[in-house]
Amino acid sequence: MAKAAVIEEAKVKASKPQTVWIGNGNEAVAHAIVQIGYDGEGYYPITPSSVAGQEVAKAFAAGKTDIAFIPATSELAAIGVCAGMAIAGGRAVDVTSANGLLLKAEEMPAIAGLSLPMVLNLSTRDVSAPLNIKNGHTDLAACLGFGWLILCAPTVQATYDMNIIAIKLAEAVNLPAIVAYDGFHTSHANRKIKVFAEQKDVRELVGEKPKGLSIFDVDHPHTFGPYMNDDLINTKVQLEAKMARAYEVLPGIFKQYAEHSGRSYNFVERYGADDAEVIMVMINTGGETAKDAVDRLNKRGEKVAVVIPKVLRPFPEKELVKAVAGARMILVGERVSQYGATNYLANELGAALQRVGSKAEIIQRTYGVGGLTLTDDDAEKLFEIAIRWPNVDDPDEQRRKWYYGAWPGDIESNPPVTIEAVTARDKQLNIGQDKVNLRDLSEMTCRFEKHAACPGCGIFVNLNLFLRGIDGPVVLMFNTGCGMVVTTGYPNTTFKVPYFHNLFHNASSTATGVVEMYKRFRKQGKIKEDITFIAISGDGGADIGMDQVIGAALRNDAFIMLEYDNKGYMNTGAQLCYTGIKGQRNSNAYIGPQQKGKTTHHKDTIEILRGTHCSYLFQAAESSPVDMIRKARKAQQTARDGGFVYGKFWSTCPLNWGMKESNGPAAVKAAVDSCLFPLYEVEKGITTLNYDPEKRNKKVPVTEAFKLMGAGFGHMVKPDFADVVADVQGEVDRRWKRLKGMAESEIL
Amino acid sequence: MPEDSKFKLPFEDGLGFCNILLSAIGGDGANMAAKMLFKLGVMKMGLDGGYDAKYGSEKKGTPTDVSVRFCRDGTVVRSVGPTTHPHILVAFHESLIKILRLNKGLYPNAIVIVNSTKAPEKIRDILELHSGQIICLDASKIAEETRSRLNMPMLAMLCNVLKFPTEAVEKAVEKQWPKAAEANIAAFKAAVNSAQKAEFPEDGKYPLVPFSRVRGELGYLNALPGGAIEALKYSTVKRNNSEARQGPCPIFNEDECTNCGMCMTVCADPGAISWKDKKMQGVDPSFCKGCMRCVVICPRTGRALRDPHKKEEKTQQKDKNTKALSR
């Protein structure tokens, strides 16, 4: 095998000054975004890519960038914002991971088909049920056929560099580009890297965005995104041609980048013995780690090497074939699998080798899924399997395709029953009872065991209290969020009742499906139980899933939906939710010379749902426990009568509010007394105020709540936030007056 | 430019790395401490390396680990994730040693820093350390007395072991947390002055324990389809929140309690307030995470339910009447 030029990542001297920078992969992405000078970013938080957007928001607040940073209501919305920016001629960027990528999947081929250059940073993560938030390449594999350019960044350094290369490439061929770096392994790894010392050098290297067709050209209007029939196939040929063009221009861009930065990249990197007989092919951190194993094995005289593709689209067939030439055995390691078929990269490499008549054997291992870290020892074990294959002891390892790191379990294990199911069949605490005695509620068995939420978390305060007002068997359905994460860490569960978590945004639709089957099976006589169905969501679930909540409300489906509103995306690191208060500090709405926290007023979810004319809507709080129980009972009766219920709680988050845990009850009370969170209910369109702080002479300014709610709000009582607070107070008073007006009316 | 490029690391593995593992609980500040240490090592000591954490959806109060790997500048940094073979182990809570089996993967002649009131000899037996040095310090007390945080005394001892110059470290701490500089520096000094150290040469008492990953009894042969959990058998009932709780539980006095039920309505860890026959029984420490919500809502605060941090009210009976439940 010739040591070909494609493999060498030669040392070049930088023509532009470079400086040492310390940070993680996400921060490196943000640093590049700011330096490139994007016009706009559509954003939605998802682990593990969230910080990449937050850092841009932070730079914006500090006045270091004038980017139009738009926190959207969902991943699809975020990339839709980007598509709009791009069609308007703006330079747009987005960051995402896993489920986020799949939710925006519909827009992905559309952006490629529309020939819109932009960059999407993909902090890779597994997509699965059961939910896993760690690394895997399911999301990346889904992108292979979207028509996007795909660059892979194995290190923090490469993540920064590839961002600059990606936008240049995208704009050179009018295609969107993905930069894929490993979630957690790279996104959260802190390293010392080199970056351009001067922003202007990055901007000069990237250059002005080439002029294309413009939606702003009113003199020569164009119709973008028409309806197309037979002609569609021609757009596919154009896409293919653009990919071919990208293959041609990319080496030049790599070269130019190397001249400016001193850092050199190519389609493929090969590392190890020149005469390697056994080669492992892996992208990203897996490949990088394997280099350490290669060093060790080469020292022992083993002829091995690792090949790391840095570009997946356009697929660098020629370079890859050249890089693995001479090998008798190739192990393709992928952080993903095509169940029931051979894997993605293995297939593409296999087909390419077949075209050149190679006789190399290819075996495949899915590894590092769900965050399992591939250590250098693991890489060495994989090499050893490849060296000896198929003469390995473990029969599973004799297979061509297998899963490295999986374990069979102990089939003898049969742990004892440790809890009793909570059916509460015998509990008749609610029926026919108008009065609520808190002491009696202690007779209702709690539906949960221990959970792992932070001390003083409001989620289980509210759910526990509410559920004490619900008799009989319940089935709980959760949206993704803190509430599900802290309760169901495999293999143990907190729930003593049936439970289902589906996705972040669709507990409502899931509940509709479950309830329909319940009605059907009950009618058929297959179910005798009187079950109450409760869907539970954080306030984020009512951003990303609002359309589905509205759907359930419009159908008036017979279940209760509860929202624990803690004023932000607390499970992903305190990003803003539309329920948050104007001026609130969020990890993507900072306080700085250019921004004063969240820029919009809190969403009024109950009022949005009022327009669906569903059976029962309410807001309840722990500060009025008797009212909460009364509402639970009414909610259960409403669902039993076949109607939809939506209830909202003001839920404390000591961690992300920066609040002392024991302040919780007082903070909730102040929110209620200030009318930030009025306690009221809407029954078939008729409004009732359940607690009027004005009448009781208890109304306080909103600042009383902010004082108690911790550092995320505490700044709002300071003089330089007087204008923001006056604005919030005005809005709260306006809504309160409107609500009182409705409560006073007989028909509203 | 690094101020000290001739700095020598106390350990180097085959790839040239000195591996440090910090085992802590979410909220301890281990992440911040490690990040600062990493920046200090790179910017001031002329080192290179990596700072990686076991990130995930862990919340405040759940175990987490953070690792810093240092190498000489010029060494290629490739692998990712927390170290599996520490030379230096820093345990922020003594209780984590057994739960997480922290001796796994430790090198011989390791340095172990533990927040504990126990003697190093006792910690050696708990850890089952093959060989090395154990340094014990009552970091919780130091943090409380100096009004600093747990991460400060632990970081101080770690920097001391690494032989990072005190002045540079203190300067970095001041820069990172300017508002708490005085408290943090006090914690730094107290830590170094109060530590108990003991050496344990290889004596055959405990074997070297290789690194291994935790593998549960459920695997691809016997896990229920779709990862479903059989709730009656696999319940969090066995979890003990005492291990994660920062600080004590509220103290309950049965004689002062009117069984009004308010504590139950605000409890963030349902189950922690135990009831029987409509009577409040006390606070179950295996549930309670010590948020003190129940104490503040109690109409007889300081009498029926009391925060142990706060002074007893005069009417309160002595501890013989207090009761804390345990299962």
Image: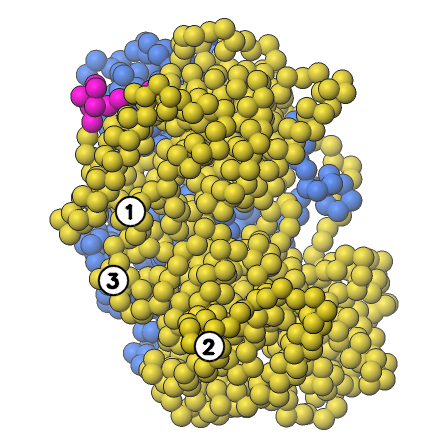
Which chain did the image draw in yellow?
Answer: A
Query: Could you tell me which secondary element the residue under label 2 belongs to?
Result: loop
Nearer the observer, A275 or A232 = A232
Identify the residue under disc 1: A582
Do we see residue A291 in this rendering?
Answer: no
Q: Chain of mark 2?
A: A
Regarding residue A7, the answer to whether it shows in the image is: yes
Three-letter amino acid code at the position of disc 3: Gln
Q: Alpha-carbon neighbours of circle 2 within 10 Å: few (<14), some, or many (≥20)?
A: few
Work out which residue is located at the far left of the displayed protein and give it: A719
User: What are the residue bounds of the magenta stretch?
Assistant: A690-699
| Residue, disc 3 | A594
x and y percent of residue A100 in the render? 54, 55
Sooner in the amino-acid sequence: mark 1 or mark 2: 2
Q: Residues within 10 Å of mark 3 (few under 14, many from 20)?
A: some
From the viewer's perspective, tell me whether residue A232 is left or right of residue B265. right
Kindly identify which residue carries mark 2: A220
At mark 1, the secondary structure is loop
A688 in relation to A540, above or below = above
Label 3 marks a residue whose chain is A
| Cα gap from disc 1 to disc 2, whole angstroms | 41 Å
The colour applied to the residues of chain B in this rendering is: blue
Residue at the location (58% across, 88% down)? A249
Q: Amino acid at mark 1?
A: Lys
* Spot occupied by residue B204 in the image (x, y as percentages of width and height): 59, 54
Residues at marks 2 and 3 on the same chain: yes
Residue A192 position within the rendered picture, expressed as x and y whole percent measured from the top left: 42, 74
Q: Is residue A696 left or right of residue A690?
A: left
In the image, what residue occupies the spot 51% across and 67% down? Answer: A120
Q: Secondary structure at mark 3?
A: loop
